[in-house]
Amino acid sequence: MNYNILSYCIYGCITIYIIVWVGKLFHANGRIFILTLFHQNESMTDTTNNLLLMAYYLFNIGYAIIQFSLWQKVTGIDALISSVASKTGILILILALTHYFNIALIYFLSEKNLFITSKNYTS
């Protein structure tokens, strides 16, 4: 039996599920942060949120496809479980780091934006 094809299928299903689920979750719940960044401008917020979702999908699907080319030969069930678990763990780690970077970026942009706005009102 070719364990590589089985591991590709398992990893592909897990990866697609995680990427789509997390993408929908961030798209729905991240809108409010972007809305405050753009001072309640809903059309700009929705456009930016949709662009971020597309960039998220492209980045993560591209990463998952690259992982297929870097896969070592799987010789048994134990190697299959180990390789799928490690590749999935790395994907989840990248998603977490990307999420925290985006939240920090939105926070710092909001703080800078509030500082600029309050400075203009006091002048």
Image: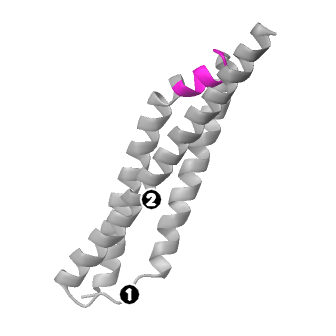
Percent coordinates x, y for residue 60 in the rendering = 51, 57
Mark 1: which secondary structure? loop
The N terminus sits in image quarter: bottom left
Q: What segment carries the magenta color?
A: 33-40
Circle 1 residues within 10 Å: few <14, some 14–19, many ≥20: few
- Dominant secondary structure of the residues highlighted in magenta in the image: helix
Which residue occupies 75% across, 16% down?
119
Q: Using the image as rendered, state which of residue 120 and residue 107 is in the foreground.
A: 120
Q: Amino acid at mark 2?
A: Ile
The C terminus sits in image quarter: top right
Label whose residue precedes the other's in the sequence (2 or 1):
1
Residue 39, magenta (yes or no) = yes
Which residue occupies 69% across, 25% down?
113
Q: CA distance from mark 2 to mark 1?
A: 20 Å
The residue furthest front is: 123
Q: Using the image as rendered, state which of residue 99 and residue 72 is in the foreground.
A: 99
